[in-house]
Every structure is written in structure tokens, then in C-alpha cells.
Amino acid sequence: MQHYHYIFTGSGLAALITVEQMLQNEYFRDLRILLLDADAKKNNDRTWCFWDKQNHYNSITHRTWNQALFADEHFSRTFDLAPYTYKMVRGIDFYEEILSKIEQHPNVHFLQEAVVDFQEMGAHCIVKTHNSSFSCNYIFNSIFRPEIIGQQKKYPLVQQHFVGWRVKTENPVFTADCVTFMDFSVEQKNNTRFMYVLPMSENEALVEYTLFSPDLLPKEAYEAEIKAYLEKHEAGTYEILETEQGNIPMTCYRFWKHNSKRILHIGSAGGWTKASTGYTFKNTIKKSNALVQFLRTQNDMRKFHQKNRFWFYDLLLIDLLYHKNQIGSRIFGQMFRRGKVEPIFKFLDEESSFSEDLNIILRCPKRWFVLALAHRIFK
């Protein structure tokens, strides 16, 4: 049985960024690392977007925008993103970048095999695939198990679910340098629903119909709304170049409670997705960097997670979106209606001071958040 110091069960965003961080650190140079995944990572299976002011992944950034639009049924606002830019990274570009780096390090291996079981066995761990078994000192698991959330009711799950079409239109209906961040002017239907548009040019864009809600829709329902949106904006005839569909868990469930001394859950399986927004990419960069620094001095994975006040803010918002899903557009509308956008991004990045937090929170509907707070206190 081959032995490794670290085994990553699942090789998605969190695993690949963490390994990339390890490759840049001399501490890990002679440690054997194995990544296991059923997928070869050869397809453009997703895109990630994030706001950034630190030049993260510039070499593989597919598109950037300097402006963003927010709209609902009552107002529309376009704002400059400076000092941030909004970035898109394609999955295939990211995979090729990281896997090419891995190939240059003989101590790191990637195997296309599906993990069927893993467990801690006292002084070591065992990982099993359909074809092999491996031992290791530590496991980093990113295989998400949605059933563990469904088995409890204390921390509700709001799903960010969407269908997107990359379209080329007859008429020039998109503003090339302006991303449509959230357009809540679409019919809400007692949910939190919006259009999200990433333009490549005046005639080409990725158009996504997105919901923050507990329940999914039939695929045809998303597609009908995209068609209606394009017709409303007089796109004319159009060609569908690519399609995508996704579902991101938004929850404050305490995933870290499942960590053990030698097993750490990472990525969505470890609660690394920002609960209040569903954004993953930049949060994963931060978590991965913290993990690599942690591993240099610590050997008990149960000590890695540190809960902060932003977790509690997210908890109240998720409670509201779950129990009062129809008020989502009002919450986000009041947040973006006035003031600069930089403090909002700073707040969502968990980099704001407490006084800055209050300025953002006070923009939101106070009555609902007070009720959510009371519900949590007396629950």
C-alpha cells in the first residue's frame, strides 16, 4: 500500500489552490502528496467570478469588468468598481494552470480515480478507490455530502441555483465593460430571483437566471426566463454558444464539527463557500493560504477553524432568505441603493471593521434582522 503525507479526496477548487500554495512553500517540498478525483479536469465545466484588487490569477483571467449594474423594480444603478475589478476565470484555464505546475513536482501526484471510502485509523488514515487503497498521515476532503445538512434543522440551507446561456445576439444589447451584478427587475414569484449578465462584447454575454431559495426549479423554467429577458432587451435572434447549470449551497451549517485530528473538510464540504453570497473563489484563496500556514506548526485538524462575527451575520441573512425568501430583493436593494460599493465588497470579504459592519447592516431592513436576531437568541 502506497503511503502519502497528505491525500486530497476530491480535486476541485479548494484542493488545487491548497496544493498550489504548498508548491510555493519549501516546508512541503519533500512531502508526498496525492490528489484523487473521478474527473480528469480536462473540460471547461464551470466559471468562477470574483472582485479583486490584488492581481489574483491575472495570467488566466478570461475577462475583467470595471463597472457593475444593480437593479430592481424601483431603481437601476451603475457604479464604478474601483479599486476593485470584477474577474472571470474559466475552469479549463484554471485546471491547466495548476495541473501543469503539479507535473513539475515529483512529490505530488494526480490520479483519476473515484474515492469510495476514507477513514481515520488512529496514527494514520486509509483512503479507498474502486481500484486501490492508500495510507496517509492526513486527509483533506472536498467531497460534499448534502445529506448531512438535510439531517438537521438548526442551520437552514438556501440554494443558489441557476441556468446560464452564453449567447451571441443579432442586436448590440450588452454594455461590454459593465457586468449586471444583480437585476431583480424580473418577476420574483415569492422568491429571491435575479438575472446575472457577464458581457464579452456588445453582442455576446453569459446570461444566467439565478435564485437564492430553498427549492430548485425544472430546467425549462430557468430557460423560459432567459428567453423572456433577451426578448425584453430586444436582442433579436440569437445563437446559444454554451450552456451551464449549477447549484451552490448557502448555509451556516458547522461543517468543521466533522473534522477530526487527521481529517479536515475543505471547500464546500468544509463550509468555505461564503454563506451569504455563494461566492467561493476568493474565500478559497484565503482559506487555503491560512491552511498552508497552519500545517507548518499544527498537527490537529480540529484546531484549524476559527469562527468570527461574519459567520453570525451570514447566519441571520440565511435565516431570512430561508424563512422570508420573498424579501431578498429588498435586502440587497437597500444595500446597493446608495453609498460607495467599496465598503460593501470589503464587508463581504470579511475585511471590514465593526463600525464599517454597522454602516452596511444599517442599510438593510432593520425590522427583519431584529426579528431574525430574536429568533436565534430564543430558539
Image: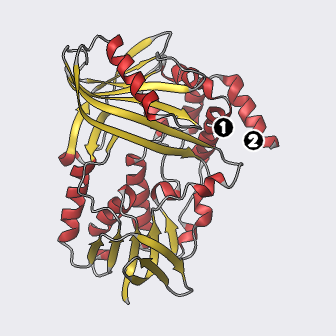
The residue tagged 2 is 376
Cα distance in 3D space between marks 1 and 2? 9 Å
**Amino acid type, callout 1:** Asp
Crowd tier of the residue under label 1, counting other residues whose Cα lies within 10 Å: few below 14, some 14–19, many 20 or above: many
Q: Nearer the viewer, residue 167 or 185?
A: 167
Q: Identify the residue shown where x is 21% and y is 78%.
A: 106
Q: Identify the residue shown where x is 67% and y is 24%.
A: 366
Residue 108 drawn above or below residue 134: above
As helix, strand or loop, the secondary structure at mark 1 comes to: helix
Q: Are marks 1 and 2 in contact (CB under 8 Å)?
A: yes
Q: Identify the residue shown where x is 37% and y is 86%.
A: 3
Please provide percent x and percent y for residue 72: 48, 15
Q: Looking at the image, can residue 269 be seen?
A: yes
Task: Give the image quarter of residue 293.
Answer: bottom left
Please provide percent x and percent y for residue 282: 38, 47
Please provide percent x and percent y for residue 248: 47, 44
Q: Identify the residue shown where x is 71% and y is 48%.
A: 153
Q: Would you say 55 lies left or right of 3 here?
A: left
The residue tagged 1 is 319
Task: Give the image quarter of residue 196.
Answer: top left
